[in-house]
Image (cartoon, rainbow, N blue to C red):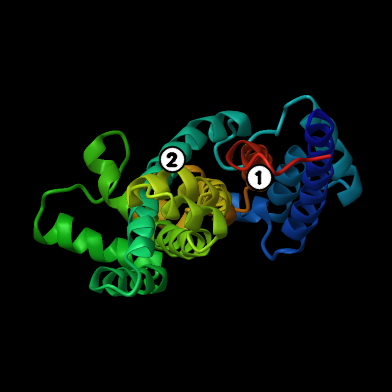
Amino acid sequence: MLKYVLKRLLQTVVLLLAVTVVVFWAMNLAPGNPAEIMLGQDATPENVAKLMKEMGLDLPLHVQYVRFLQNLLKGDLGNSFRTRRPVVEEIGRAFPVSVQVAAISVAVSAVIGVTIGVISAVRQYSVLDSTVRLGVLAGVSIPTFWLGLLLIYLFSVYLRILPSSGWGSWRQAVLPCLTLATFPLALFVRLTRSSMLEVIRQDHVRTARAKGLPGGTVVRRHALRNGLVPVVTVVGLQFASLIGGSVMTETVFAIPGLGRTLVMAVYSRDYPVIRGCTILAASVFAVVNLVVDVLYTFLDPRIRYE
């Protein structure tokens, strides 16, 4: 197991290095000059050239990249072009907020989704099962931004019982977390149902039933554990994707998280912040994948890594 973990960590380093190359060159291919955007339409060519020199953008691209890697190894992501503050501080304020939003959304959707999925599988072809499948179809079909705007209109504008923006209190967390949890919830229900249906038809579950064990005991002891193996993968991936991918939701609800920080950085061509947010999101994704793989061995002892 230790050898496998070290191998995966080495692969993660290579992956992050590839991400820095792609992000670094892709940003420089994008239209728009950061110095011109910061100085505005009245900027003179002399002022633009002076500011580009201050930001190090007048250097050849490969020199900028090598300098970026040298600073990255020291834990320095540079300063934001827009705020002039260190990127580490910018991300340090936004990242915990995104983690909270993602953790609440995934936790709620996983608990409810797995429970509904198990019940739906046990009662296959019942009215409840048909209703759940219809709800799953609606959950995966509704666009996130549209659902967010709909919830704002219903609970903030019409009923006036919940705030429509901001972050810091439980009331401000209800609408964005509900918006983000809808798609993972439908996904967990669908995956749990299909996985449980496959497991409860296997021989060891039939044997347990033949011994006269109660139905609930058979599900809990002999079916649920194996049925949760693929669900754990999706839970981990959804958590990682929501941290860096909740761009639309954070923008709609004005949440000061990583996604909204990234959007503002893209608008202002704030290269250091874009690089920092992208590398952090990729790192979280890689680490969560590794944790999920390790969890497999606890859920299913038959799985072993060489």
**Where residue 153 appears, x then y in whole percent?**
19, 63
Can residue 182 be seen from the camera position used here?
Answer: no
For label 1, the crowd category at 10 Å Cα-Cα, with few meaning under 14, some 14 to 19 and many 20 or more, is some
Q: Which mark is residue 50?
A: none
Q: Amino acid type of disc 1? A: Asn
> Label 1 vs label 2: CA separation?
16 Å
| Quarter that holds the C terminus | top right
**Where residue 198 appears, x then y in whole percent?**
52, 64
- Total marks drawn? 2
Q: Is residue 134 left or right of residue 80?
A: left
Could you tell which of marks 1 and 2 lies nearer the N-terminus?
2
Q: Amino acid type of disc 2? A: Ala
Of 238 and 189, which appears nearest the observer?
189
Which quarter of the picture shows residue 128?
Answer: bottom left
- Secondary structure at badge 1 equals helix
**Where residue 63 appears, x then y in whole percent?**
90, 43
The residue shown at (67%, 43%) is 293
Which quarter of the picture shows residue 92?
Answer: top right
The residue shown at (58%, 40%) is 299
The residue shown at (32%, 65%) is 123
- Secondary structure at badge 2 equals helix
The answer to whether mark 1 and mark 2 are in CB contact below 8 A is no
Q: Is residue 120 left or right of residue 244?
A: left
Which residue has dot 2 on it? 103
Which residue has dot 1 on it? 289
Most distant residue in the front direction: 211
| Quarter that holds the N terminus | top right
Of 79 and 149, which appears nearest the observer?
149
Of 127 and 104, which appears nearest the observer?
127
Can residue 11 be seen from the camera position used here?
Answer: yes
